Amino acid sequence: MATAASATPGAAFGAKTPSPATGHASAAFPRPSPRAASAHGRLHANSLHLGGVSATGSSSVVGNASGIHLAAPVLAPLAVPKMSGAVGAHKSVLLFHCEEMRELAEQVVARNDDIELRSISWRTFADGFPNLFISNAHTIRGRHVAFLASFSSPSVIFEQLSIIYALPKLFISSFTLILPFFPTGTSERMEDEGDVATAFTLARILSNIPISRGGPSSLVIFDIHALQERFYFGDSVLPCFESGIPLLKSRLQELPDSDNITIAFPDDGAWKRFYKQLQHFPMVVCNKVREGEQRIVRIKEGDPRGRHVVIVDDLVQSGGTLIECQKVLAQHGAAKVSAYVTHGIFPNKSWEKFQPDNGEGPEHGLSHFWITDSCPLTVNAVKDRQPFEILSLAGPIASALQI
């Protein structure tokens, strides 16, 4: 005996059946007339309900002439993942370092609780080649990693490059190389065919650091010597060029004669690169002129009389130009003379040339000589010697690691 369902299988699926009144086929669910739709309420496009939950979360269905109530589905907003670079977010960073930069790395970690110090075993084999080991390498997967480097001499560059090339391959989230002092190119002069631009060579080496899971590596450099060197880097690295001048400006504000400061530049090159950061100070610009076999420093513009004059440059090597600049400023009536350089290189202990004035005037020496800790070997040599004072890059580096 057939059941109701089996007797009229098409009716359950909206099949047409003969109309008893007319004999014509009609839908099992008849189309409502305009009059009926008006009587039972209009269908609204924003209230589609197809067997799901209604806009209010209710499963009840209000009938109409069609027998179907269509209600719009409610879509919950998509959850957007919080990115490490979002405003207010703090990026947790694992900081590795070479041996020379241990003290600076510890200071960086002390400035920011989101930075954790990690270690590397720096050893050598019997033949003198590096024997390196990254401690707990498996624990850095998926983490933001940075390396604080010091290319103080060619003998230490290779071992650090080995680490720099290895870290991004350990499935880390991102990699940042902090190289406070970019050493090559400081004395190069491309004047004759055959001169080799080693700054370009080092830039190409750093441009080929392996890509981490997060993309190209970042490179942080402070006050690169030749501004055109920033264009030596390729597209596979993201160079970030910072400056130590904000540290100097903060220190000058602490001086008792902060309202009597004049900035002096030893040459036009120093003026071009720094004057915009120091433009609210009065300025003196010096230049070098050749007289016979000698190069003499003269004041090109500005007046140092009665002022505490601070000579500003990006780096110092032998220090000869700074000393000549100090002398000419003293001859033109400067009350005090101090100096600032971001990178104190001082080969062959040339820092010994600089003496404190001991309150006797600028013709006897410098009131202050500020340098940063970008060159750690120099810092160890002069940190307890007058007139030197160290302005630490720890704060700016900690900030750069949060970019």
Image (cartoon, grey):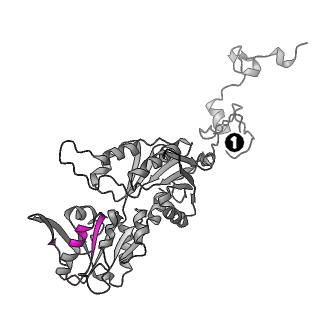
Q: Is residue 94 left or right of residue 252?
A: right
Residue at screen point 18% across, 69% down: 286
Which residue range is magenta in the image? 297-324
Dividing the picture into quadrants, the one containing residue 76 is top right
Q: Amino acid at mark 1?
A: Ser
Reading the image, the residue beneath label 1 is 54
User: SS of the residue at dot 1?
Assistant: loop
Residue at screen point 20% across, 65% down: 267
Residue 136 x %, y % = 63, 49
Residue 307 x %, y % = 24, 82
**Does 262 appear above or below 397?**
below
Residue 2 x %, y % = 88, 13
- On whether residue 303 falls in the magenta region, the answer is yes
Of residues 334 and 8, the one nearer the viewer is 334
Residue 346 x %, y % = 33, 64
Of residues 290 and 49, the one nearer the viewer is 290
Residue 18 shows in this picture = no
- Residue at the front extreme? 126
